Image (cartoon, rainbow, N blue to C red):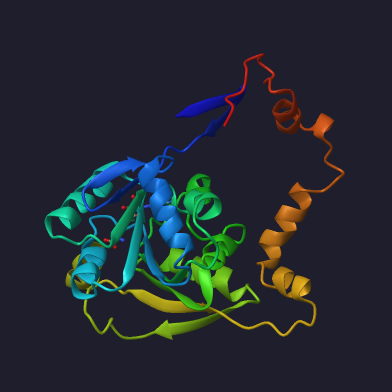
Amino acid sequence: MTGKLSRGVRAHFQPARIARDGEHGWLTEQLGETILQEVSSSIGEWEVELGFGKGRYLLQRAATDPQQRLMGIELVSQYFRLVSERAHRRGLDQLVLLQGEALFLLATWLPARFAHTIHIYFPDPWPKAKHHRRRLFDEETVDLLLRALTPDGKIVFATDHQLYGARVLEVLQGHPGVELEMIDSVWPDGARTNYEEKYIVEGRKILRFNARPSLVSAVDPQDAALELLHPLGRETLLVAGSPTRSASSDPLMSESQTGESQTGESQPSS
Ligand SMILES: C[S@@+](CC[C@H](N)C(=O)[O-])C[C@H]1O[C@@H](n2cnc3c(N)ncnc32)[C@H](O)[C@@H]1O
């Protein structure tokens, strides 16, 4: 679904789907409501995988660890359907699957600190500069990932793409509220995902690490909250919200106030 804001500017309203135990629906429908209530009443108990692809890791985990609350988020609808069908056939009814853009769902739908582990395996590296904004990790979005974690939680990460891996490490090392633990060996449970299995056979070097929120010794809790944001991301946010950028000088802000775009089209209500 795409809404037109003004000439050349498009806003993508992301229709996100949800599935569990053979039941499918839009996030805004009853199933979405029910699961959101369940997530909200079990904050901190979840593990979530972002970009689960064909779902090897999630399906195995759900089979071997039936008590664990598990969630997967995947952009591509074919993978979402494939994995939800497999989960249903195998009776893995604790698995909650979302189809949508992970950062969007973390920013808009999922509660803060709901997960104690975020798994990110072989995320798309988007090597071309014009596509970098699609990456899961940069200074402006890393705090969305951290917001989803409990204070004692962790991000578990792996990539074969050394340049992107170095970039992710740079983002995390620049964050005052994150501690890194490099993992020099394979996982104790062997290859976790389809990509990992393939890359191990090909003999590719794999970068693996855990990233954990670290405690910040600030007296004022408000300072602590600020200190926990990535400084470069925070700078961008502060500039974006600066009062020197008035609504009348900003075509997007004035549009949203009048409800009309520069092309004269009415804006969608949501
Ligand atoms: C390279 S594949 C890796 C799949 C799986 N993790 C593995 O290791 O086999 C990356 C996956 O992430 C999904 N993906 C990429 N960007 C995403 C995003 N922003 N939100 C959710 N899923 C995303 C892609 O559709 C794709 O399935």
Q: Is residue 155 above or below residue 184?
A: above
Q: Where is the C terminus found, in terms of image quarters?
A: top right
The image quadrant of residue 49 is bottom left
Nearer to us in this view, 171 or 19: 19
Residue appearing at x 27%, y 63% in the figure:
94
Residue appearing at x 36%, y 50% in the figure:
98
Q: Position of residue 45 (x, y in %)?
A: 42, 72
Q: Where is the N terminus found, in terms of image quarters?
A: top left
Q: Residue furthest left?
A: 89
Q: Position of residue 199 (x, y in %)?
A: 23, 68
Please state if 78 lies on the left or on the right of 258 as rendered.
Answer: left
Q: Position of residue 218 (x, y in %)?
A: 76, 82
Q: Position of residue 144 (x, y in %)?
A: 56, 60
Please state if 94 lies on the left or on the right of 153 as rendered.
Answer: left
Q: Residue furthest right?
A: 244
Ligand 1 is in which quadrant of the figure? Answer: bottom left
Nearer to us in this view, 252 or 66: 66
Nearer to us in this view, 103 or 173: 103
The image quadrant of residue 193 is bottom left
Please state if 9 lies on the left or on the right of 205 as rendered.
Answer: right
